[in-house]
Amino acid sequence: MDRRQIIVTKQDHSDDIPKLHEAFKQRFRIGAAVNPITLDTQSELLKHHFNNITAENEMKFESLQPVEGKYTFAVADRLVDFAATNGMGVRGHTLVWHNQTPKWMFENRDGSAVDRETLLARMQAHIETVVSRYKGIIYAWDVVNEAVSDNSGELLRPSKWLDIAGEDFIASAFEFAHAADPKALLFYNDYNESVPEKREKIYTLVRSLKEKGAPIHGVGLQAHWNLEHPTIDEIRQAIERYASLGMKLHITELDVSVFQFEDRRTDLTEPTDEMLARQAERYQQFFQLFKEYSEHIHSVTFWGAADDYTWLDHFPVRGRKNWPFLFDEKHRPKQSFWDVIDTARS
Ligand code: GLA
């Protein structure tokens, strides 16, 4: 066996590799988004490195109540069972969102728009049923996802929720969730959370929810980041701004794309050495920051686990592979992983 083979064998044998969640156990949980396929294909990796999971899609509205009153919990239950068997926690994602919500929610039988009372009653029924089912199991829920607008000068995103129910739909969702499980931690979750203009809108929304007395406990920073954006300074400011409202912070959907959002190149079959080096540097800086603010940050969830499966393989360029995680396509630790482990130990 030459040296290279020895190294590869060692990396494949995960018992020799430090567990990511153990490395950070004094500070925050380490989570991964999963789906029924990755629960099988990434099972060993998940059990070794993660102590928390989130359903990538299986707890979204369209998955749990595709038809009014017909709840489909089988797949979500399987995820919850996997977590229980392996001693992991579960973050719930997500109760109210403009996407992946079936049309029936907003319509009467004749296709016309429902009135406010009907929409809020349907929302309440959904939240009560779902949150009660996992009461005491799911310790934190993303109650409302992505309600803030990316457009300049506009606070809330135009949506059917907003059109029909008005801005109070957000506070109502938190109230319904709190009534169903008073112990669950309730989060507002969004992306571009570290972009200064959007950060201020999220801050304004969360502050107004608090002022109204809505039972909100935290802000979820999705953290779909890349090799250059956002800057460490922008992330730091976002953390401080949200924490100043007394909110708990969860990093909810972390991945580090090797492409800038505007970059449409499609020529790569593997990441370049420069990309991997920069990615490792970024991950190290992020975890340094998370550690520094661990008084506020209680959970760090990746939006996946290893480079063999990521939603970024299709977004924003269809069919283009991306390599956003700490583990490669064969689940071997990347330089990013070792640098993050160093951060935990330093
Ligand atoms: C958003 C949602 C997630 C997921 C990602 C893309 O961030 O919150 O549920 O859909 O987009 O995978």
Image (cartoon, rainbow, N blue to C red):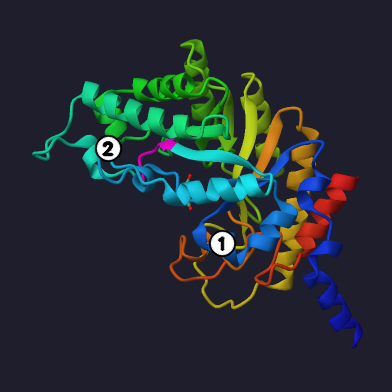
Mark earlier in primary sequence (1, 2): 1
Residue type of the residue flagged with mark 1: Thr
Mark 1: few, some, or many residues within 10 Å (few <14, many ≥20)? some
Indicate the position of residue 41 as horizontal and vertical percent values. 59, 66
The answer for how far apart the CA atoms under marks 1 and 2 are is 29 Å
Residue type of the residue flagged with mark 2: Gly
Visible residue check, residue 262: no
At 23% from the left and 36% from the top, the residue drawn is: 106
Do the residues bearing badges 1 and 2 touch, measured as CB atoms within 8 Å?
no
Q: Which residues are magenta?
A: 95-99
Q: Quadrant of the N terminus?
A: bottom right
Labels 1, 2: front one: 2
At 57% from the left and 59% from the top, the residue drawn is: 39
> Can you identify the residue that label 2 sits on?
69
Residue 310 magenta: no
Mark 2: few, some, or many residues within 10 Å (few <14, many ≥20)? few
